[in-house]
Image (cartoon, rainbow, N blue to C red):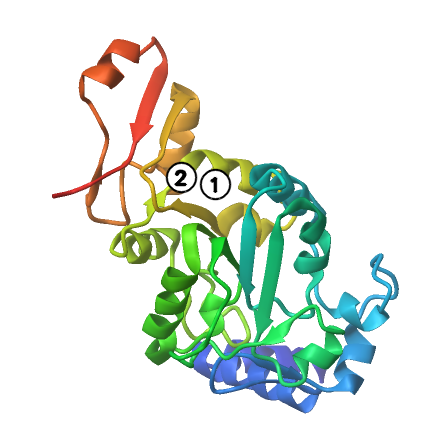
Amino acid sequence: MFVALLVGVSGRSAGAAKLARASAAKSSGRAELATGAWAMSDGYINRTATKSCGEPVQAWCVYRLDTGLVKEMARFFGGSASVTELGAGVGRYARALTPSVRRYSAYDGMPGIEQRSRGWVTHGDVSNASLELAASDYVVTFEMAEHVPRKFESTLLDLIDRAATRGVILSWSDKGNDGVGHVNAKRASQVQQLFCARGFHLHSVPTRALRSASYYWYFKKNILVFEREPPTAWVDAPIASEMARQGTDMRRCGQNRCCRSAVEAQCIRGLRRNTTCMTAWLEA
């Protein structure tokens, strides 16, 4: 019977398999709302939360925490930055990073999230264009945007744009049918194009640092760091080549060259052998 079940699933279309996974998740006590936010029953949380994750409330262990990513983000923020997180879940990153920042404001669209998180997370519906968010140096969002339906994508990007005074750190999954609720998956080049169009510049150096420090494969693949101010970075030629292969070369924005490298005198004068100057500029 088990073999027959596997054969039946493998013969379905990708869409049918995705619906089956979503249905199974819903029947288990987890469901995705029309806005892309998750709703979880107490029973689901109690069944799926790991027994020990270092949190004072076991139910919080239903969400993962990448401690390698946390350490590198703490170094990046340097104790002085303010942060707004969207799709914060029960606030594991908020609790881990609060000691390393000036202020951390976390939001999630899960019903009852303020009670579940014991006040660490404020309810916030990213499909609501009028949502008031705390403006911060950086907006952070991890593996959330792919859950937001495409019709709300512009609203989400507008909210991020309004709240981020200096930059954005995000991980946007490119896994479509392979992920439950992934209704708006995007490749890194597509994400880069979206933010480039809004005046943000990909900063390859912290992007690479955060990816390298992360333990989970999806962060290693999907993390991107954007800055409002055009960043300048000197990197060795092998690293520059690696960034280009990853699609994180900040001289490019997605598939279109709406950013260009600076080849002006200041870069030429400072150019050293086996070193690449990667400076992002907006096209006029």
- Checking the image for residue 207, the label placed there is 1
Residue 106 % position (x, y): 60, 65
In the image: residue 122, left or right of residue 12: right
Which three-letter amino acid code belongs to the residue tagged 1? Thr
Please name whichever residue, 257 or 266, is drawn nearer the observer in this view of the structure.
266
Up the image or down, 59 lies above or below 268; here it is: below
In the image: residue 45, left or right of residue 200: right
> Would you call the spot at circle 2 few (<14 residues within 10 Å), some (14-19), or many (20 or more)?
many
- Checking the image for residue 265, the label placed there is none
In the image: residue 17, left or right of residue 54: left
Identify which residue is drawn at 67% across, 59% down: 94
Q: Quadrant of the C terminus?
A: top left
Location of mark 2 (residue): 203
Is label 1 in contact with label 2 (beta carbons under 8 Å)?
yes
Identify which residue is drawn at 64% across, 70% down: 89
In the image: residue 37, left or right of residue 90: left
Up the image or down, 275 lies above or below 161; here it is: above
Residue 229 % position (x, y): 33, 41
Please name whichever residue, 10 or 14, is drawn nearer the observer in this view of the structure.
14
Q: Is residue 13 visible?
A: no
Residue 32 % position (x, y): 56, 83
Q: Secondary structure at mark 1?
A: helix
